[in-house]
Image (cartoon, rainbow, N blue to C red):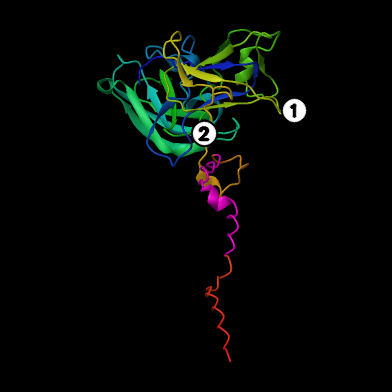
Amino acid sequence: MRSKRLLPRLTATSVVTGMLLLTGPVLPARAAGGPDLAAGKVVTASSTNGQYTAANVNDGNQATYWESGSAALPQWIQVDLGAAARVDQVVLKLPAGWGARSETLTVLGSTDGSAFTTLAAAAGYAFDPAGGNTVRIDFPTATARWVRVQVSANTGWQAAQISEFEVHGTSAAAANLLAGRTLTASGTSQNYGPGNAADGNQSTYWESANNAFPQWIQGDLGSAAKVDRLVLKLPPGWEQRSETFKVQGSTDGSTFTDLLAPPPTASTRPPETRSPSRCPRPPPATCGCCSPPTPPGPQPSWPSSRRTAPPPATPRPPPRRPTWPTPSPKPARSG
């Protein structure tokens, strides 16, 4: 994965409220390696020492660090992920040039910010410059919004120290990567700004300038991430409507490629080809779902004698009797 930010852009037709960019569908937990859910989120601590504030642990700079303001341990530092997420790994770092040391650490999680449960029990973890002064703590997948690391011992200093604090979810967890991120848009109408689309409140919304389409809204994830789902919402009381969208992504914020193009409209969709086999029986001539029937072929031509009555037969003449010669009269006898 390139270490550049992924900026998903949504080209829309009018308004968008809750905008959620999600990783893959929830699957059985497997090895951690998802995006850093703590990047850019709000971090607080039990105490701080001057300039070594809690915000240093997710600024992307391993050279800056948080240090507790008291030598009385334990001390803690925690991050608000913005929304509950499935998490299973914490990655902690110290400045790369520091000498080796170990700290005793406990990982806790909470869904309400007040009641915490143990995700990883207290144990000693070695920070070694040969390994980048990095510690990875794996634990069973849990749902939490606030993730806290408690430091109860540090062999290198009398206070708690952390330079980078990362929280990772299972690689297929459906975490909202846009929660708390910076959103920008091509235009805004009145006070309906793009930040409304990621504030977690479905009643607030972004609205573009009227009658000037297309318009777009985009969110900066802070770093490159694998994404495959986008959830959009409108205020729950609004009436039904439809909008045409195109989803684009970028790793540099300037060159965008289509992640999802709008479906073809009715005018561009190819005509449907129907098969005569869809008719349950041979169709009549007016059947609209099948091919028209084959017109009948030419009728055979018969001789005229077959079409008209035969002429009447000529009557036969009666048979002729033979004509015999009339006998001559006999001469009279004389006395």
Residue at image mark 2 = 109
Where is residue 43 shown, x and y percent of the image?
52, 20
Quadrant of the image occupied by residue 63:
top left
Instruction: Quadrant for the N terminus, please.
Output: top left
Q: Is residue 296 within the magenta segment?
A: yes
Q: Residue 272, how many percent across, how many down?
A: 53, 33
Q: Is residue 203 visible?
A: yes
Residue 281 in sight from this viewpoint: no
Residue name at image x 37 percent, y 20 percent: 157
Q: Residue furthest bottom?
A: 335
Mark-to-mark CA distance, 1 and 2: 34 Å
Residue under the image location 54 percent in, 52 percent down: 306
Identify the image quadrant of the C terminus. Answer: bottom right
Span of residues in magenta? 292-316
Please say if 308 is above or below 27.
below
Q: Secondary structure at mark 2?
A: strand
Label 1 amino acid?
A: Gly
Which of the 4 image quarters holds residue 154? top left
In this view, 253 is above or below 283: above
Residue 68 placed where, x, y %?
A: 47, 19
Left or right of 105 on screen, residue 238: right
From the viewer's perspective, is the residue at label 1 or at label 2 nearer? Answer: 1
Disc 1 crowd, CA 10 A, few/some/many (<14, 14-19, 20+): few
- Which callout, 1 or 2, points at the residue further toward the start of the chain? 2
What amino acid is labelled 2 in the image?
Answer: Gly
Q: Is residue 323 magenta?
A: no
By secondary structure, the bulk of the magenta-drawn segment is best described as loop
Height in image: 272 above or below 263?
A: below
Residue identifier under label 1: 237
